[in-house]
Image (cartoon, helix red, strand yellow):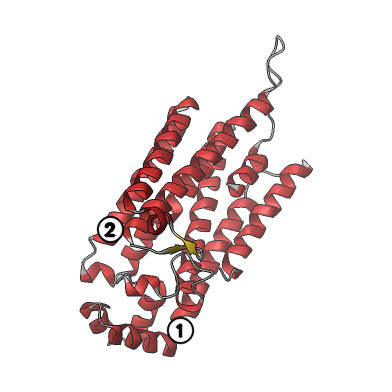
Amino acid sequence: MQVLLLMATALNVHLPEPIPNGGAPMAAELRARQQLLAQITEMIHVASLLHDDVLDDADTRRGIDSLNFVMGNKVSVLAGDFLLSRACVALASLGNPEVVSLVAKALEHLVTGETMQMTTTTEQRCSMEYYMQKTYYKTASLISSSCKAVALLAGQTGEVATLAFEYGRNLGMAFQLIDDVLDFTGTSASLGKGSLSDIRHGIVTAPILFAMEEFPQLRAIIDQGFKDPKNVNLALEYLGKSHGIQRTRELAAQHASLAAEAIDSLPETIDEDVQRSKRALIDITQRVITRNK
């Protein structure tokens, strides 16, 4: 939500004159619509987390008992469904067909990404291309589409809207890549589902995929799966000997750099609020890749 509000300020330049006959100023009306879009995005995001925790049978979320653990799967699913329904009602109230289509597509991508993760074949599980596509669907699509929607609401050009989209896409990819690193290097108190959550659920992420490039014998372990704790330990041994963690961090840094470049490419302005927001958006790209939780 913070990203979208900063993006809104960064793009709200050359606004039309106030509405005549005592109506609300266009700037205030636009800001309210963009704030609503940020709220919609947050509702969708939280709903996806509630559903993810049910699908993954997670007991914790950021070190706190998950809703499904406390209240059961049915309540958690219904809570997610309720948030999605309220988000859809609010989205329709924006009255912008292109924005509605964008966010609806991101919702479709969330489901597609989860389905890809649940139905992956052994070949797909070992494919970096497949992993990156799934990561875009599950993590980066919502923020990239929402950033673009903010630009569209502001009446920006297609070029500027594309830059906003690229910022969100690359920021989302960088965030997930670091999340995948932290699943191996972090602690259960600071991570969403606890350390080694992905590999214990049979989910192969970038660090392991990079490690497999250095140690092809890791492929046989992946093919066997990780239900046996011995295979988890073997995979971790290979990961420790490889540059998998380092290469994943480097890939995240590349995406963060691309996100920052997108902001740098936005139209120049002397407006101090716009300049501050652009600097904050760039700062976020660095915070994403240096975080430890």
User: Does residue 194 appear to the left or right of 112 in the view shown?
Assistant: right
Give the residue displayed 32% in from the left and 82% down from the top: 232
Is any atom of residue 106 visible in this view? Answer: no
User: Does residue 285 appear to the left or right of 100 in the view shown?
Assistant: right
At mark 1, the secondary structure is loop
The percent coordinates of residue 170 (x first, y second) are 50, 57
Q: 192 or 255: nearer the eye?
A: 192
Q: Which residue is mark 1?
A: 243
Q: 84 or 242: nearer the eye?
A: 84
Depicted 66 relative to depicted 274: above or below: below
- Which class describes the residues within 10 Å of circle 1: few (<14), some (14-19), or many (20+)? some
Q: Amino acid at mark 1?
A: His
Is any atom of residue 212 visible in this view? Answer: yes
Q: 50 or 29: nearer the eye?
A: 50
* Label 2, label 1: how far apart the Cα atoms are: 27 Å
Depicted 108 relative to depicted 64: above or below: above
Q: Residue furthest top?
A: 21
Give the residue displayed 50% in from the left and 68% down from the top: 191
The percent coordinates of residue 103 (x first, y second) are 43, 39
Foreground: disc 2 or disc 1: 2
Q: Are marks 2 and 1 in contact (CB under 8 Å)?
A: no
The percent coordinates of residue 260 (x first, y second) are 61, 57
Q: Amino acid at mark 2?
A: Met
Q: Which residue is mark 2?
A: 116
Image quarter of the C terminus: bottom right
Give the residue displayed 60% in from the left and 70% down from the top: 290
